[in-house]
């Protein structure tokens, strides 16, 4: 069940489904009030973990480690993780992370349009567009129009 239009803890409204992996779904969202240094109406990415994830203690530990690492490190080349929480939705507790919303295309999307990629195109990426790495899958490498490489260990 997709969660667009739902509100998490009266603070974030989920706007659009962006993608999913084995453990979570990611949505674009908008803040409804000030949270963790974000102002109302800021656009964010929200990683909502699937209900089964809390059945595994090692997954709970991994989520906590992901949050601690992402929220404690501040660097222009790292994806920001702003906050975390547990959301009670339809009588089921679901962990979530509020993160920086990436603006760009995944490497998979880029290759679909520009395949095959010539060597001169690869070199030009370093001058004009940069890859942001969200995890090791093709859908999590982003071309963005900033001059900063963004890295995170976050997996969907």
Image (spheres, rainbow, N blue to C red):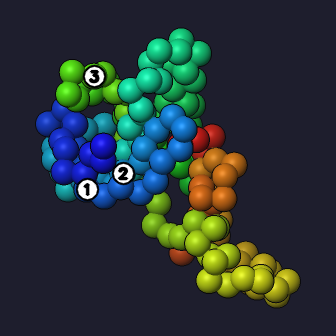
- Is the Cβ of the residue at disc 2 closer than 8 Å to that at disc 1? yes
Quarter assignment of residue 42: bottom left
Q: Nearer the viewer, residue 42 or 53?
A: 53
- In this rendering, the label closer to the viewer, 3 or 1: 3
Q: Which mark is residue 148?
A: none
- Of the numbered discs 2 and 1, the one sitting upstream in the chain is 1
Q: What distance separates the C-alpha of mark 2 from that of mark 1?
A: 7 Å
* Disc 3 crowd, CA 10 A, few/some/many (<14, 14-19, 20+): few
The answer for how far apart the CA atoms under marks 3 and 2 are is 18 Å
Q: Is 29 situated above or below 104?
A: above
Instruction: Write the residue at 36% across / 51% down.
Output: 27
* Outermost front residue: 1
Instruction: Report helix, strand or loop for mark 2.
Output: strand
Q: Closer to us: mark 3 or mark 2?
A: 3
Label 3, label 1: how many angstroms apart (C-alpha)? Answer: 21 Å
Residue at 63% across / 67% down in the picture? 108
Q: Residue at x 59, y 50 (%)?
A: 134
The percent coordinates of residue 54 (x first, y second) are 44, 18
Q: Is residue 120 above or below residue 94?
A: below
Residue named by callout 2: 27
The answer to whether any part of residue 20 appears in the image is yes
- Identify which residue, 83 or 136, lies in the foreground: 136
Q: Quadrant of the N terminus?
A: top left
Dot 1 corresponds to which residue?
15
Residue 92: assigned label: 3
The reply, left or right, for residue 138 in relation to residue 45 is right
């Amino acid at each position: 069940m997709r969660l667009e239009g739902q509100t998490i803890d009266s603070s974030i409204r989920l706007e659009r489904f962006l993608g999913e992996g084995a453990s979570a779904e990611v949505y674009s969202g908008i803040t409804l009030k000030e949270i963790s240094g974000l102002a109302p109406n800021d656009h964010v990415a929200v990683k909502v973990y699937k209900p089964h994830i809390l059945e595994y203690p090692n997954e709970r530990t991994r989520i906590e480690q992901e949050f601690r690492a992402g929220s404690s490190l501040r660097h222009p080349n790292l994806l920001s993780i702003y906050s975390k929480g547990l959301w009670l939705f339809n009588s089921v507790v679901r962990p979530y992370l509020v993160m920086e919303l990436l603006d760009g295309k995944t490497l998979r999307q880029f290759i679909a349009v520009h395949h095959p990629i010539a060597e001169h195109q690869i070199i030009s990426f370093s001058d004009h567009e940069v890859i942001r790495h969200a995890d090791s899958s093709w859908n999590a490498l982003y071309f963005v129009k900033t001059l900063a490489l963004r890295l995170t260990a976050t997996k969907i």
